């Protein structure tokens, strides 16, 4: 899975917006103004940071060398996944979905209803 595939998948999630609020290499994906993914577009450091339940975050770090504590994030709740081909695309999609659902589940009901999930 490449960076463009990841971008397209994130944008397919209901209510997702994208932007560069931090710098020109950190592409952020939000739902209802809450971040659920950050794509690092810098040379040689390509990866995606995703929100994750704390116990699962630890487990994934043990299972996959490409999964590390979230760079510049709360390391209890965020993982960074290096996009180097070592993690199956299906797993990355699963983790994007998990991150998105975590954020959506924390939204007020009226905002969740707008998303029609």
Image (cartoon, grey):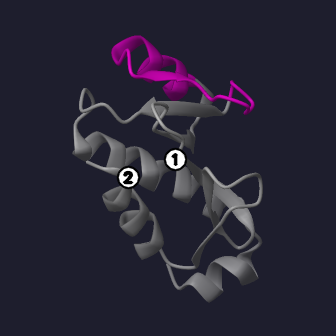
Q: Position of residue 79 (x, y in %)?
A: 56, 31
Relative to 37, 73 lies left or right: right
Q: Which of these two is toward me, 42 or 79?
A: 42
Residue 41, labelled with which disc?
1
Q: Is residue 113 magenta?
A: no
> Residue shown at 45%/31% (left/top)?
44
Q: SS for tag 1?
A: loop
Q: Label 2, label 1: how many angstroms apart (C-alpha)?
A: 8 Å
Which of disc 1 and disc 2 is earlier in sequence? 2
Q: Position of residue 14 (x, y in %)?
A: 50, 78
Q: Which of these two is toward me, 101 or 35?
A: 35
Picture quarter containing residue 81?
top left
Q: SS for tag 2?
A: helix
> Residue shown at 76%/60% (left/top)?
21
Numbered range of the magenta stretch: 55-76
Q: Is residue 69 magenta?
A: yes
Q: Position of residue 115 (x, y in %)?
A: 58, 83
Q: Residues within 10 Å of mark 1 (few under 14, many from 20)?
A: some
> Residue shown at 45%/64% (left/top)?
10
Residues tagged 2 and 1 counted as in contact (Cβ below 8 A): yes
Residue that badge 2 annotates: 3
Q: Is residue 68 above or below residue 23?
A: above
């Amino acid at each position: 899975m490449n960076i463009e595939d990841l971008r397209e998948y994130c944008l397919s999630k209901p209510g997702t917006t994208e932007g560069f609020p931090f710098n020109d290499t950190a592409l952020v994906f939000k739902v209802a103004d809450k971040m659920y993914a950050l794509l690092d577009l810098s040379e040689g450091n390509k990866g995606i940071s995703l929100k994750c339940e704390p116990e699962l975050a630890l487990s994934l770090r043990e299972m996959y060398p490409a999964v590390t504590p979230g760079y510049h994030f709360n390391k209890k709740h965020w993982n960074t996944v290096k996009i180097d081909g070592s993690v199956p695309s299906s797993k990355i999609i699963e983790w994007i979905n998990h991150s998105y659902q975590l954020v959506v589940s924390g939204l007020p009901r009226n905002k969740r209803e707008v998303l029609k999930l």
